[in-house]
Amino acid sequence: MLKAELKKFVSPFLFLIAVLISLVLYHTEISFIYHYFPNGAGVPIFNYTLKWQEEFGSKMTDENFQKVEEDYQKLIKETDEIVAASSYGKERNLKSYQDFEDWRESIPGERRDELNEEEEKEWDALAEFIQKPQFMEIEGYKNIQDGLARFTSEKSFYQDRLVSSEKKKLLNDVVFEKESWRNILPEGFPGTVSAMIATILILGMIVMALFLPTPFVKDTMLKIKSLQWASRKGRSLVATQYIATQLASFVILTGVLCLFLLPLVKTNLAQFFNNGLNSFFTESFATADYSLFDFNVSGWMWLLILLVYLIGLSFSSVLFFTAQHSKNYFSLLLKVIPLLTFYIIVGNQMVSRGFYINNYFYKKTGILWIEMYLAVLLFIVGIVIGMIPIFTSRKQDLLTE
């Protein structure tokens, strides 16, 4: 019976729709980390994470910071020679990188639409000149140094930040006492990865909403269910259907996770999986985010994957209940749309920046592990709701016997 119920979920037409939806979500959301991360001003900073990870390992010591400062001074001397020898520098009598910086500050005009023709030409020449990799490396290092200044003392770290005394104590323990700020981790990495996993969860739930409820509604419309209940073997039909639904949901979630998350291990980001969740590189990002947990990245990702399974299986269980109480496809659609919307909103907020202080639910409650507590609660409620038709169908069967 289980095998027969699982076969009901197979539909080439729905599979084609699922593939199209997957392609859309991949190109609009998921592909970012594979093709566009990092981008813009984050590229030179990311290059430093790769370089220092290879040279120093997962954490930076004071000696390591001294070494990179020496390398930076060598870079400045190299750039001095580039500026002095370039036609751009000769035309403007620039003999060093500092001269170039002073000259750049003196160029008038903040907005391009307010520039005259001569000023616009000057800005165009400047934009072309600073494309040299040395200039990008210097700008990246400056941003890193600005972030490092935050960790000279607790006072500088909490400057301009409103943090409760309880959260401050937890942050001090992880960031300063355990020195997790010394970890090497690309800026924006946690937010980007967690957003991708949240999108994978959303995709999994959309695919489940396509495949799982329709066979049961079809059985109801064709009155197959009443015929099946006429036999003793058919009394356990709903329980078998529930098990089949959960197995199919598990396969769908595993499939989308393997398809879209597993390739991450083949990228250059995989070398950071054994590093801690906090890093001084975070301060180079627009929205600095920290975790109150001393996990490594791989452990953190497994926790996010567990959230995906808990939320996804909860959704499929409630979806099963909905399908059992829908008489036609239109009735099913009216119930599935708000249900899917609710799970998408809640699931996305749970997984995005999960186990970081900027997670939506942590910011609202201030409770550690709130993401896991809510996911487990959602899972238990979903399982209870999904099992209701099993018991009600048995009672109906006995009454009609």
Image: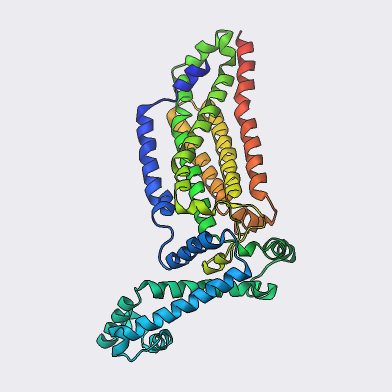
Q: Residue at 62% of width from left, 64% of height from top?
A: 182
Q: Residue furthest bottom?
A: 93
Color encoding of the figure: rainbow
Asked if one can make out residue 325 in the rendered structure from this viewpoint, the answer is no
- Who is closer to the viewer here, 151 or 205? 151
Q: Quadrant of residue 275?
A: bottom right
Q: Quadrant of the C terminus?
A: top right
- Who is closer to the viewer here, 181 or 271? 271
Q: Does 283 sit above or below residue 389?
A: below
Q: Does 50 sit above or below residue 237?
A: below
Asked if one can make out residue 308 in the rendered structure from this viewpoint, the answer is yes
Q: Could you tell me residue 116's position as x and y percent?
A: 27, 87
Q: Residue at 52% of width from left, 62% of height from top?
A: 55
Q: Could you tell me residue 296's position as x and y percent?
A: 61, 52
Q: Does 355 sit above or below residue 289?
A: above
173 vs 109, left or right, is: right
Q: Residue furthest left?
A: 117
Q: Could you tell me residue 283's position as x and y percent?
A: 56, 68
Q: Quadrant of residue 384?
A: top right
